Image (tube, rainbow, N blue to C red):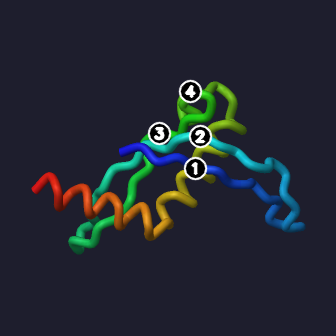
């Protein structure tokens, strides 16, 4: 399931925004840990149609990991994926 995102990447030392208003889509799926707890797994991060995980530039892959971390910790996305799974079942 794809979700739109818009976020800033801030410098962790100063808290200042380095890359403002990054917009794109993230492709997510619902997965389960060994204890049966659901979690979000971001499988692709797209900006301007480019999957940042597949970029040759490490900076873009790091940006994808940053976005994925934010999305995977977003409880509303987990709720949406769980609701979608219930509809399918």
Between discs 3 and 1, the one toward the N terminus: 1
Relative height, residue 17 to residue 35 (above, below): above
Task: Assign a secondary structure to mark 2.
Answer: strand
Residues at marks 2 and 4, CA–CA distance in whole angstroms: 8 Å
Query: Label for residue 5?
Result: 1
Badge 1 crowding class, 10 Å Cα cut-off, few under 14, some 14 to 19, many 20 or more, is some
Between discs 4 and 3, the one toward the N terminus: 3
Q: Kindly check if marks 3 and 1 are in contact, taking CB atoms under 8 A apart as contact.
A: no
Residues at marks 1 and 2, CA–CA distance in whole angstroms: 6 Å
Q: Kindly check if marks 2 and 3 are in contact, taking CB atoms under 8 A apart as contact.
A: no
Between discs 4 and 1, the one toward the N terminus: 1
Left or right side of 3 for 67: right
Query: Label for residue 44?
Result: 3
Of the residues tagged 4 and 3, which is closer to the observer? 4
Between discs 1 and 2, the one toward the N terminus: 1
Q: Tell me residue 53's x, y (percent).
A: 55, 35
Task: Assign a secondary structure to mark 4.
Answer: loop
- Residue drawn at x 51%, y 58% is 71
Between discs 2 and 4, the one toward the N terminus: 2
Relative height, residue 56 to residue 33 (above, below): above
Left or right side of 4 for 85: left
Badge 3 crowding class, 10 Å Cα cut-off, few under 14, some 14 to 19, many 20 or more, is some
Residues at marks 4 and 3, CA–CA distance in whole angstroms: 11 Å
Of the residues tagged 3 and 1, which is closer to the observer? 1
Badge 2 crowding class, 10 Å Cα cut-off, few under 14, some 14 to 19, many 20 or more, is some
């Amino acid at each position: 399931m794809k979700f739109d995102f818009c976020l800033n990447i801030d410098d962790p030392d100063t808290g200042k925004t380095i890359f403002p208003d990054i917009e794109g889509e993230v492709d997510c799926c619902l997965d389960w840990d060994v204890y049966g707890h659901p979690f979000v797994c971001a499988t692709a991060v797209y900006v301007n149609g480019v999957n940042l995980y597949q970029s040759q530039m490490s900076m873009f892959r790091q940006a994808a990991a940053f976005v994925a971390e934010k999305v995977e910790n977003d409880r509303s996305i987990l709720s949406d994926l769980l609701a979608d799974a219930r509809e399918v079942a």
